[in-house]
């Protein structure tokens, strides 16, 4: 049966702000305390979704989470009405209020790890929610992520949504940002490449920045997703590039079908990994970018590899890049030469995602890739699929509810909490998700 890859993009939330919460993510740290524009951020992401949908690439939407997360503040000892909880947190622990107000759930590449039905032992599509336990502001996402995914992938005959792994360091899981799938047609069995940063008891780990993904977590996710053991490869990310700001594998590599586009320093024992892939993926092609042409620091600055690599019906591929890649002379020179070489990439599309980029997330961060056969696609909640009607409705919704200026100090405004809840209540009705947020329970 025919299958296609559907990109489920995260909508930027109403509390999008620059707090520098993500140690190891240099863009996040660099832009700390800058004034943000949530309305522009949401519209930039929405325009990318619509443009790709119009170009023939199936596209869907994942809603933002409820922020501020008042339940998390109550767990930390703040009491009173919801407004009083926010006010007390702002007065006594503004850094905690900032963390529970983060709009980081927009980077849905970290929402879950996906196994298509062609790779699963039980023939279902599996999604295991990421626990994201390396960062507090992200670890609190898992319960709502699970509820949202279950509202989108409702049919348990075709889909299985698994809860996040235990919230302990040994099972640190960052979702699809550290996962690749390679193979032929989307509907055929593929090889799943799980990339980890550290292993319990091993000394091969970065020294400056944390390695967020563990081998133990990757192994557990592969089991939960019922990936056929013959179709799994576990590979370690190069600790040296993690220490240069490559906090996830998708900042240094991206794959699609038989192609792996990556930096020459992306993986530990990279050539041995390529040998494994050549033996198991028919037609495997490594597009390996030399450090002499694009340094790791240039890749981190421009998010060259935090791109989307999409297949057209004729087998050619389109590379989706952020504006920063075009504005860097060396990176753009490399990309121009890449288009002239003998490889499947025949076109480059560039999008302005500056609001997301300034907080440390590019095109790949904003989307969760889900391979679906025709009957599986029909079983997905149809209200989340991007089309002209939904695009207009979401634009009007953003215009109505989003602010065009936000600072950390604004997070204490009780009106922001009310605006956000009213907006999300409206959105869940628009997307037919039911009551997925704590304030709706």
Image (spheres, grey):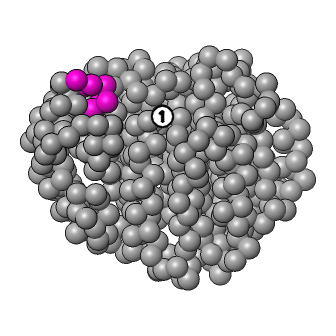
Q: Would residue 146 be found to the left or right of residue 423 on screen?
A: right
Task: List x then y, in percent, for residue 95.
Answer: 31, 25
Q: Would residue 412 be found to the left or right of residue 337 on screen?
A: left
Q: Name the residue beneath numbered marker 1.
A: 135
Q: Would residue 375 be found to the left or right of residue 268 on screen?
A: left
Q: Does 97 appear in magenta?
A: yes
Q: Does 215 appear in magenta?
A: no
Identify which residue, 100 or 300, lies in the foreground. Answer: 100
Task: List x then y, in percent, for residue 156.
Answer: 52, 79
Q: Which residues are magenta?
A: 92-98
Asked if 237 appears above or below 206 in the picture, the reply is: below
Identify which residue, 199 or 119, lies in the foreground. Answer: 199
Name the image quarter holding the N terminus: bottom right
What kind of secondary structure does the magenta stretch mostly adopt? helix
Determine whether the residue tagged by mark 1 lies in a helix, strand or loop: loop
For residue 230, say whether it is visible. Answer: yes
Which residue is at 18% across, 49% downward? 420
Which residue is at 54% across, 50% downward? 130
For residue 322, say whether it is visible. Answer: no
Which residue is at 78% across, 41% downward? 235
Which residue is at 68% across, 77% downward? 123
Residue 213 figure quarter: top right
Residue 147 figure quarter: bottom left
């Amino acid at each position: 049966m025919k299958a296609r890859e559907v990109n489920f993009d995260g909508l930027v939330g109403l509390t999008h702000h620059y707090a520098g919460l993500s140690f190891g993510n240099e863009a996040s740290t660099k832009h700390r305390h800058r004034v943000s524009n949530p309305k522009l951020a949401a519209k930039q992401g929405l325009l990318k979704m619509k443009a790709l949908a119009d170009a023939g690439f199936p596209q869907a939407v994942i809603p933002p989470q409820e922020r501020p997360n008042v339940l998390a503040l109550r767990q930390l000892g703040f009491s009173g009405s919801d407004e009083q909880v926010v006010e007390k947190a702002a007065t006594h622990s503004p850094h905690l209020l900032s963390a529970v107000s983060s709009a980081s759930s927009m980077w849905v590449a970290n929402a879950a790890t996906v196994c298509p039905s062609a790779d699963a032992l039980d023939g279902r599509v599996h999604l295991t929610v990421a626990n994201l336990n390396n960062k507090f502001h992200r670890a609190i996402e898992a319960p709502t992520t699970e509820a949202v995914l279950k509202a989108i992938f409702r049919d348990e005959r075709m889909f299985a949504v698994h809860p996040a792994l235990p919230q302990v360091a040994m099972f640190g899981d960052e979702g699809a940002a550290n996962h690749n799938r390679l193979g032929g047609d989307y509907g055929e069995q593929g090889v799943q490449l799980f990339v980890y940063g550290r292993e319990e008891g091993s000394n091969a780990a970065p020294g400056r920045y944390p390695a967020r993904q563990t081998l133990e977590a990757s192994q557990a996710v592969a089991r939960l997703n019922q990936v056929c053991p013959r179709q799994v490869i576990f590979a370690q990310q190069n600790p040296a590039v993690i220490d240069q700001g490559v906090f996830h594998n998708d900042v240094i590599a991206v794959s699609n079908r038989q192609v792996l586009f990556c930096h020459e320093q992306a993986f530990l024992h990279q050539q041995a990994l390529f040998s494994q892939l050549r033996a198991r993926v028919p037609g495997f092609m490594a597009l390996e970018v030399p450090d002499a042409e694009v340094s790791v620091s240039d890749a981190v600055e421009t998010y060259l590899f935090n791109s989307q690599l999409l297949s057209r019906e004729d087998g050619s591929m389109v590379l989706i890049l952020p504006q920063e890649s075009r504005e860097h002379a060396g990176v753009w020179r490399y990309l121009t030469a890449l288009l002239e070489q003998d490889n499947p990439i025949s076109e480059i599309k560039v999008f302005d995602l500056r609001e997301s980029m300034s907080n440390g997330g590019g095109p790949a961060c904003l989307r969760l890739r889900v391979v679906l056969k025709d009957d599986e696609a029909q079983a997905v909640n149809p209200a989340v699929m991007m089309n002209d009607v939904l695009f207009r409705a979401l634009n009007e919704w953003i215009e109505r509810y989003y602010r065009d200026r936000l600072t950390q100090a604004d997070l204490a405004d009780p009106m922001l909490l009310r605006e956000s809840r009213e907006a999300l209540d409206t959105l869940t009705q628009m997307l037919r998700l039911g009551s997925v947020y704590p304030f709706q329970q």
